[in-house]
Amino acid sequence: YLSKMLTNFETITEPLSEYEQKELLPKVVLGLSLRIGKESAISSAKIIKALTSKGYKINGPRLRKIINHIRMTGLIPCLMANSDGYYISYNHAEIVRHRESLKQRAEAILAVERALAEQWKTIQQNQQQKLFA
């Protein structure tokens, strides 16, 4: 798994720092390992509140980066997310639905990218026409 920074989001998607790897990651893994089942979901806000109340420094984007790392490296297999938060599921149907949701979200993002490309193409064509008018 390669941690890749995202264009226009470099600051919040940079690889985990040594502090995040050594101090935060083990605590997040331990806390999430106890969250088995949808009814045990914990929100990002609660995770951040719990960590900051103990003196740790973390924000939403960096927590998402840590959770992405956990999911991509399999530190916690089948770590799910829904509107209530993060939890572990061993329910096949739930995992299939979550995978489908991820695919749909990715497709929606790609649809926006394609629309933006078409809009830019139209703008370029209009400028070309004005140039030769």
Image (spheres, grey):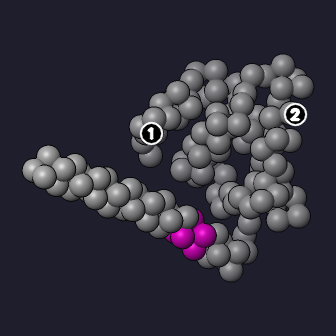
Task: Using the image as rendered, state which of residue 50 and residue 131 is in the foreground.
Answer: 131
Magenta range: 99-104
Task: Using the image as rendered, state which of residue 48 and residue 71 is in the foreground.
Answer: 48
Query: What residue appears at the point 35 percent right and 58 percent down from the top-left corner?
Result: 119
Checking the image for residue 111, the label placed there is none
Tag 1 residue: 6
Q: Secondary structure at mark 2?
A: helix
Query: Residue 65: image x %, image y %?
Result: 60, 39
Query: What residue appears at the point 47 percent right and 31 percent down from the top-left corner?
Result: 10
Q: Secondary structure at mark 1?
A: loop
Q: Splitting the image into 4 quarters, where does residue 2 fall?
A: top left
> Does residue 15 appear in this view?
no
> Does residue 75 appear in this view?
yes
Query: Residue 47: image x %, image y %?
Result: 82, 39
Task: Using the image as rendered, state which of residue 6 and residue 69 is in the foreground.
Answer: 6
Marks 1 and 2: in contact by CB < 8 Å? no
Q: Is residue 102 magenta?
A: yes
- Crowding around mark 2 (Cα neighbors within 10 Å: few <14, some 14 to 19, many 20+) is few
